[in-house]
């Protein structure tokens, strides 16, 4: 049974003159660890801090339905079951969503995807006459590994997935995605509606350059005090971390370095075996899950940030690294060129070319002055992605569609 709490009464009057009641429908939310869950949590909390009445509807992380009040946000967790193709995520059963949306009585529904909860939220909102905003975080590449789709079938499977996406999101009032490149991707996949790019945003106060020597941060993670290349994210196939590890022997020919990997995922064991097989097992350090409150320290422990993934619609982790003042070496793929300006705040490498990746890492690790200059440029770029600006734009969209 779907549990709910009574929504607080909002004063009558134009939407612009009172707090909004926003229902966010999402298939993934903390404790899930992924970019979409992280963004949705920060969006919900940020809107609540601004005085909005925010309700998140998502899958229960434990199975039974329940309602929590966390960080000023009412979280309605729907009854769920384990998602067999994913080791940690769960799939919800939104059979009572019509009743729930009637009880919440939102001014606007903001969905974060077109899967189970997002799809059901759109349908329920349409029946109730509630306007819908939709943000896309979807890339088929992010699902292929978990769905065990053979390589030979992925192009066809991707085409089917995009057709389904187009059908579902064509029913909403406004569509957003994190970057212009991601918006262009949707249009290239046959989506005919206008798509507005709105950055996921970054908390510039939490993530900022630190004046202290890196040693203090490295001690917090028991990292040796040597040049450190950092990755933060899921240790999964589409992140292509094998390319980063394969680059390390070339880097070690020139500098005393190590790779620190923050995150968990299905490739953890395979990556460790690869590192040992090519002789760098002691220089690839798996830090595992790092609590959100310690992430700024993880970035502070690094000299360079690396993002070899090829399915990034923006990459919140790359933005966090940039806000911390780190130069970035990233794959020349999807939206990463939107963040990395070659020769200014880092470098791009051709996916699959570990030697090119190694050359860029070696050049940065060997030049403190270059790292400092590019790190400052990273910070300047990150400042244009202040999450307060993103929140303001979403609030403006809510007002526009709810008139």
Image (cartoon, rainbow, N blue to C red):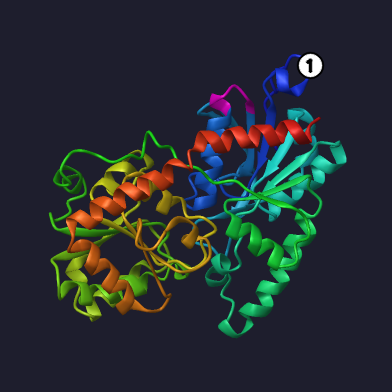
Residue nearer the viewer, 23 or 15: 15
Q: Secondary structure at mark 1?
A: loop
Vertical arrangement, residue 242 with respect to residue 55, above or below: below
Find residue 275 and report its image quarter. bottom left
Find residue 294 and report its image quarter. top left
Q: Is residue 299 visible?
A: yes
* Residue found 17% across the figure and 68% down from its top: 282
Vertical arrangement, residue 243 with respect to residue 319, above or below: below
* Residue found 75% across the figure and 54% down from its top: 169
What is the quadrant of the C terminus in the image? top right
Find residue 297 and report its image quarter. top left
Vertical arrangement, residue 352 with respect to residue 238, above or below: below
Residue 315 located left or right of residue 357: right
Residue nearer the viewer, 327 or 94: 327
Q: Is residue 273 visible?
A: no
Residue nearer the viewer, 233 or 302: 302
Magenta-highlighted residues:
48-53
What is the quadrant of the N terminus in the image? top right
| Residue 20 in the image, given as x and y percentages of width and height | 69, 25
| Residue 132 in the image, given as x and y percentages of width and height | 76, 42
Residue at the outermost bottom position: 152
How many numbered tags mark residues here? 1
| Residue 333 in the image, given as x and y percentages of width and height | 49, 68
* Residue found 18% across the figure and 49% down from its top: 218
Find disc 1 in the rendering and name its residue.
13
| Residue 149 in the image, given as x and y percentages of width and height | 59, 77
Residue 89 located left or right of residue 322: right
Residue at the outermost top position: 11
The stretch drawn in magenta includes residue 51:
yes
The stretch drawn in magenta includes residue 246:
no
- Dot 1, how many residues are within 10 Å of its Cα: few (below 14), some (14-19), or many (20+)? few
């Amino acid at each position: 049974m779907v549990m709910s709490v009574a929504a607080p009464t909002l004063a009558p009057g134009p939407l612009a003159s009172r707090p909004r009641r926003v229902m966010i429908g999402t298939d993934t939310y903390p404790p899930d660890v992924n970019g979409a869950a992280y963004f949705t949590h920060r969006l919900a909390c940020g809107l609540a801090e601004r005085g909005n009445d925010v309700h998140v509807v998502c899958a229960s992380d434990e199975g039974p339905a329940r309602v929590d009040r966390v960080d000023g946000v009412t979280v309605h967790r729907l009854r769920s079951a384990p998602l067999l193709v994913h080791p940690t995520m769960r799939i919800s059963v939104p059979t009572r969503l019509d009743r729930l949306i009637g009880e919440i009585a939102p001014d606007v529904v903001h969905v974060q995807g077109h899967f189970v909860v997002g799809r059901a939220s759109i349908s329920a909102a349409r029946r109730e006459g509630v306007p819908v905003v939709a943000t896309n975080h979807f890339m088929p590449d992010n699902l292929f590994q978990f769905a065990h789709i053979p390589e030979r079938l992925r192009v066809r499977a991707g085409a089917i997935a995009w057709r389904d996406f187009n059908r579902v999101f064509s029913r909403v009032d406004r569509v957003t995605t994190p970057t212009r490149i991601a918006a262009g991707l949707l249009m290239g996949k046959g989506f005919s509606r206008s798509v507005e790019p709105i950055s996921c945003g970054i908390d510039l106060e939490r993530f900022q350059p630190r004046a202290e020597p890196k040693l203090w941060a490295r001690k917090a993670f028991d990292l040796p005090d040597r040049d450190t290349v950092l990755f933060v994210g899921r240790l999964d196939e589409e992140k292509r971390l094998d390319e980063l590890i394969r680059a390390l022997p070339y880097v070690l020919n020139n500098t005393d370095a190590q790779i620190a990997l923050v995150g968990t995922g299905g490739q953890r064991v395979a990556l460790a075996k690869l590192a040992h097989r090519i002789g760098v097992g002691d220089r690839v350090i798996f830090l595992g899950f790092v609590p959100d409150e310690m992430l700024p320290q993880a970035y502070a422990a690094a000299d360079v940030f690396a993002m070899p993934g090829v399915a990034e619609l923006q990459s919140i982790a790359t933005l966090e690294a940039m806000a911390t003042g780190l130069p970035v070496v990233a794959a020349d793929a999807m939206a990463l060129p939107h963040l990395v300006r070659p020769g200014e705040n880092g470098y791009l490498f051709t996916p699959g070319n570990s030697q090119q990746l190694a050359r860029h890492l070696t050049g940065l690790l060997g030049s403190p002055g270059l790292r400092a200059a590019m790190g400052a440029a990273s910070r300047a770029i990150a400042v244009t992605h202040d999450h307060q600006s993103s929140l303001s734009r979403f609030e403006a969209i809510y007002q526009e569609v709810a008139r």
